[in-house]
Amino acid sequence: MTPGGEKKYVMVYSYIRTYIDQKKFTMNTKIPSENFLCSKFSVSRETVRTAIKKLTEEGYLYSVQGSGTFFHKAIALSANYYRVDKKIKIGLIAQGQDFNASSNIVQGIKHILNTDSVELKIFITDNKIANERKCLESCYTGFDGLIVDGVKASILNSNLDCYSTIYEKDIRVIFFNNYYMYTPFPKVIIDDALCADTLIHKLVECGHRYVAGIFVYDNYQGIEKYKGYVRSLLKYGAVFDDKYVKWCISDETYDKKNFPKSIMRFIKSLPKATAIVCCNYMIMEMVREMMALNGKSIPGDYSLVCFDYSNTDWEETGITSSIHPGFEMGVKVGKKILEMVNDPNYKEHDYSYVFPPNIYEGTSIKDIR
């Protein structure tokens, strides 16, 4: 027996079940080798084979002589999740695109949920609607709550039927960053409207009237930031013109070859523009890179501000920006989901929370008055 009273083969069995859960949406259906499992758990080959035998008898695994042991994907996709004792089971469904923000949020969630009474399962959607659907369908059974970063949340989502099923099953759901309008779930977000007001005000105060904006239109955050940008330009007497706005989809921001070039073409097409507002950290980094490649300086040639700066080097770069509350947001949603799980009347209460923007005033705005 292990120190916790658990048979050794159960540790191996649980690990393989978790491995199957993580791999069942991929093409890889081969489980780790016996040598790897023996080494990882410091157990004998006999112990590993006992776990594999049990999983084979349950229909999850099969062996191919000379090739190894594989899991049945169809069975894995239809199976209920393995629940350890009577732990609270929470699923985290994250986009995973902005590595800095995602990593910090996950760390905050783990800080709260890393207890003996909670089991946390992490899914990555890569901001793909089809991936999100597979994750949601896998969470119909065995889960007490889900923490979700919505996928392409500003467009009509074809997975709302999954969310309806989850709601009917009384599985608690809370969104962070991106959420779906007209759904009954609470959300933890940032006040993007107030953030836009603050950033635009700083630019206009320094004499900037022609302010370009680069926004993502397939997530709800991007839409809210854009609306705040427009309202603030009009409020503070700057110029609003559609041609000063570049729209993109979130997937484009990962095209490091073509997207930066399109950004530079957009900026060059605006001879009156003296400042640029970036929807997120990734776009801001591309703008800085293209400025450097084209011999332009910040703030000498263009002033630059940014929403959701998710790295830790804002003081080094000097970019005036709102700092993304990654870890703090993770802590907040972690606490909220536990409160919801323990609240039998959770549907009657509002567990939403809005973070006020945390503005860092750097040196990236030039006074041109």
Image (cartoon, rainbow, N blue to C red):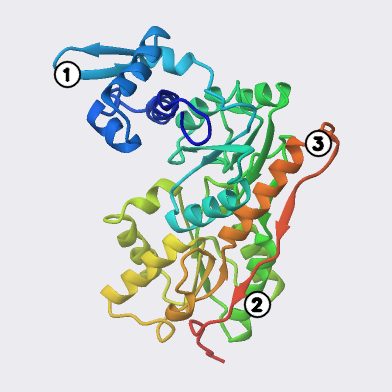
Residue 364, visible in the rendered structure = yes
Rendered location of residue 92, percent (x, y): 55, 39
Rendered location of residue 12, percent (x, y): 39, 27
Q: Secondary structure at mark 2?
A: helix
Circle 2 Cα neighbour tier, 10 Å, few/some/many (<14 / 14–19 / ≥20): many
N-terminal-most mark, 3 or 2: 2
Q: Are marks 3 and 1 in contact (CB under 8 Å)?
A: no
Name the outermost residue toward the bottom. Answer: 369
- Is residue 237 positioned above or below 335 on the image? below
Residue tagged 3? 343
- Is residue 58 positioned above or below 225 on the image? above
Q: Are marks 3 and 2 in contact (CB under 8 Å)?
A: no
| 40 or 336, nearer to the observer | 40
| Horizontal arrangement in the rendering, residue 365 relative to residue 113 (left or right) | left
Residue tagged 2? 201
Residue tagged 1? 67
